[in-house]
Amino acid sequence: MDNDFKKKFLMNRDETGRFIVKSLKTGKTYFVETLDNGDRNDWGDLDPVTKKLTGSYGDKYKGSIKPEESLITEENGFEKIYMLDPGQSPLDYINQLDEKYS
């Protein structure tokens, strides 16, 4: 992957939940995206008096993306794409892959 793609991938990472892991064990680089499965609740500021949600941030800073926004595609040069089950740790999965590759 070139540096321009890496910059694009990491842009607004707090909003997208994207991150890159470089294994110290194997030297392999892993690109990780958190996909939104659509069951998230809106979030914002809770008014202490009315107990109502105000200032909803919608899609901002939710730490995930919609599947159609994924940059991890064959068209972008990815050969091995893994989809994890909800709740499965990407870092643990990377460790498991590293055990296979070492």
Image (tube, helix red, strand yellow):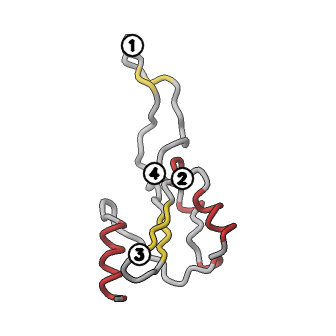
Could you give the CA–CA distance between mark 4 and mark 3, rounded to whole angstroms? 31 Å
Quarter of the N terminus within the rendering: bottom right
Label 1 SS: loop
Label 4 SS: loop
Q: Amino acid at mark 1?
A: Thr
Q: Amino acid at mark 2?
A: Arg
Of the residues under marks 4 and 3, which one precedes in the sequence? 3
Of the residues under marks 4 and 1, which one precedes in the sequence? 4
Q: Disc 4 designates what residue? A: 38
Return the x and y of residue 56 as percentages of the image width and height: 51, 30
Of the residues under marks 2 and 1, which one precedes in the sequence? 2
Q: Is residue 60 shown above or below 51?
A: below
Residue, x 53% and y 62% (percent of image)?
A: 67
Residue, x 59% and y 67% (percent of image)?
A: 71
Of the residues under marks 1 and 3, which one precedes in the sequence? 3
Could you give the CA–CA distance between mark 3 and mark 2, rounded to whole angstroms? 20 Å
Q: Disc 3 designates what residue? A: 23
Residue, x 53% and y 34% (percent of image)?
A: 57
Quarter of the C terminus within the rendering: bottom left
Q: Disc 2 designates what residue? A: 13
Q: Residues within 10 Å of mark 4 (few under 14, many from 20)?
A: few
